[in-house]
Image (cartoon, grey):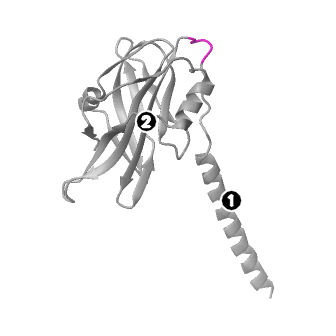
Amino acid sequence: MIVKDKHITMKTTKIFTILTLLMGLVFSSCTTLKVTKDPNQPDSSVLAISARSKGVGMDGFGIIIRVENVETHQQYDSKTLSGFSKDAIIPNLPAGTYNVVRVEVPVGGVEFKNWSQAIKEFFGTIVIEPNKKYYLGSYCGEFSGSLSDRAFELVFDSHEISNDLISVVSKAGWNDGDWVLINPDRKQIRIN
């Protein structure tokens, strides 16, 4: 009888441990990025982008971009608003001329990345002026091609800005003026 109770206790402990880990994952992925305008950079701007993706049995939300200042070569990475958010931002970006030099799109457990010259050309040169809000658009990641030549492409969808993104950016201190919408060079680019 004692052995049986010990077995039940071990099974209950395992279930409790698994549930605790799952709850931790859920809460950590739902944590919202805290964005504030740096008081030491009152003329800084914010750059945002959105993406969602679908694969064979896999979905993905979010996109990570890296921009590089053409003059200083300083690089800045975007951060998603939360674990399941399609929106990503680079806050406190100093005025200057930038290129997007890297794109990462997560789909399920896989990340598709591109840091080629084609990425720079796709987004073009971005001139950031002081104290403004810039939006690179909303994109959809999709698979295309045959099974033997499968490609993952980032396709421009729209300039519709989510209410979550508008709210976060406004609360952070960038609430003056309209969003500056930036158009890509063409409608789609291959990521892998």
Q: Where is residue 126, by image quadrant?
A: top left
Q: Which is more foreground, mark 1 or mark 2?
A: 2
Q: Which of 116 and 179 is in front in this view?
A: 179
Q: Residue furthest right?
A: 2
The magenta stretch is 38-42
Q: Mark 2 points at which residue?
A: 160
Q: What residue type is labelled 1?
A: Thr
Q: Residue at x 48, y 17 (%)?
A: 132
Toward the viewer: 91 or 11? 91
Q: Which mark is residue 111?
A: none
The residue type indicated by label 2 comes to: Glu
Mark 2 Cα within 10 Å, few/some/many (few <14, many 20+)?
few
Establish if 151 lies above or below 100. below
Tag 1 near tag 2, CB within 8 Å: no
Q: Is residue 134 magenta?
A: no
Q: What element does badge 2 sit on? A: loop
| Left or right of 179 on screen, residue 156 | left
Above or below, comparing residue 44 to residue 112 in the picture: above
Residue 41 lies in what quarter of the image?
A: top right
Sequence-earlier tag: 1 or 2 = 1
- Secondary structure under tag 1 reads helix
Q: Distance between the residues labelled 1 and 2?
A: 37 Å
**Residue 20's disc number:** 1
